[in-house]
Image (spheres, grey):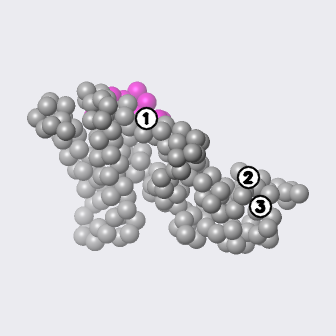
């Protein structure tokens, strides 16, 4: 029987708090059970082991990220939409470093729920870049570029890779503006994919 007061939502929330505070590698069934003040076997009433827990965390993270992107981009177009999307991505990564780490793993090919959740995030980015006349492979390349820029910035920031005493938010804005200048070049056909 599941413990009274412990449900999948509480379990996921606690695992997320642990990951955000100590990193995704700190999330084990033993550490989660200790934080919940229960025995590890009790967790199996709610998850099918650590891989299932990490998958559920990734799903939760993708859902939160998708909601944040949607909320911030709503009503915006063009450059303003790209800026809003990038700011929302960075804000999510800063607020939820453990969940951010969880969503970086590529989903299994047969995992339809993960494919759908990841597809919703990608779809939002595709919608934003499609305003620049990019479609098909060109739009997907632009999505990869945005993701690479954002993930690189987030990773360097989290690992203390920016040691110079310069405002990181200024660097971030410069990076986004550089992307915007580049995507306009692609749109204008001055650079061929």
Rendering quarter of residue 186: top left
Mark 1 to mark 2 CA distance (whole Å): 28 Å
Specify whether 102 is left or right of 138: right
Q: Are marks 3 and 2 in contact (CB under 8 Å)?
A: no
Q: Residue at the location (14% across, 30% down)?
A: 188
Q: Was residue 10 drawn as part of the magenta stretch in this picture?
A: no
Helix, strand, or loop for circle 2? helix
Rendering quarter of residue 21: bottom right
Q: Which residue is mark 3?
A: 44
Helix, strand, or loop for circle 3? helix
Q: Position of residue 86 (x, y in %)?
A: 36, 45
- Residue 83 visible in the current orientation: no
Q: Was residue 73 drawn as part of the magenta stretch in this picture?
A: yes
Helix, strand, or loop for circle 1? helix
Magenta part of the chain:
70-79
How many neighbours does mark 1 have within 10 angstroms: few (below 14), some (14-19), or many (20 or more)? some
How many neighbours does mark 2 have within 10 angstroms: few (below 14), some (14-19), or many (20 or more)? some
- Quadrant where the image shows the C terminus: top left
Mark 3 to mark 2 CA distance (whole Å): 10 Å
Is residue 171 or residue 3 the one in the foreground? Answer: 3
Q: Which residue is mark 1?
A: 123
Q: Residue at the location (46% across, 55% down)?
A: 104
Q: Earlier in the sequence, mark 1 or mark 2?
A: 2
Q: Which residue is mark 2?
A: 8
Is residue 18 or residue 51 the one in the foreground? Answer: 51
Q: Which mark lies nearer to you, 1 or 2?
A: 1
Position above or below: 67 against 78: below
- Residue 108 visible in the current orientation: yes
Main SS, magenta region, reads helix
Q: Position of residue 78 (x, y in %)?
A: 29, 30
Q: Earlier in the sequence, mark 3 or mark 2?
A: 2
Q: Which mark lies nearer to you, 3 or 2?
A: 3
């Amino acid at each position: 029987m599941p413990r009274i007061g412990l449900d999948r939502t509480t379990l996921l929330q606690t695992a997320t708090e642990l990951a955000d505070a100590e990193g995704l590698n700190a999330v084990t069934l033993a550490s989660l059970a200790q934080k919940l003040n229960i025995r590890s076997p009790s967790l199996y009433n709610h998850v099918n082991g650590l891989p299932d827990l990490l998958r559920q965390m990734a799903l939760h993270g993708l859902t939160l990220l998708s909601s944040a992107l949607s909320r911030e981009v709503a009503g915006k177009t063009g450059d303003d939409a790209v800026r809003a999307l990038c700011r929302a991505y960075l804000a999510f990564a800063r607020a939820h470093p453990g969940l951010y780490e969880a969503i970086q793993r590529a989903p299994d090919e047969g995992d339809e729920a993960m494919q759908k959740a990841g597809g919703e995030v990608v779809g939002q980015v595709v919608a934003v870049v499609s305003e620049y006349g990019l479609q098909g492979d060109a739009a997907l390349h632009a999505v990869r570029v945005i993701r690479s820029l954002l993930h690189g910035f987030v990773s360097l920031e989290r690992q203390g890779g920016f040691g110079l005493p310069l405002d990181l938010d200024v660097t971030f804005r410069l990076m986004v503006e550089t992307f915007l200048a580049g995507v306009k070049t692609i749109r204008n056909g001055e650079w061929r994919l």
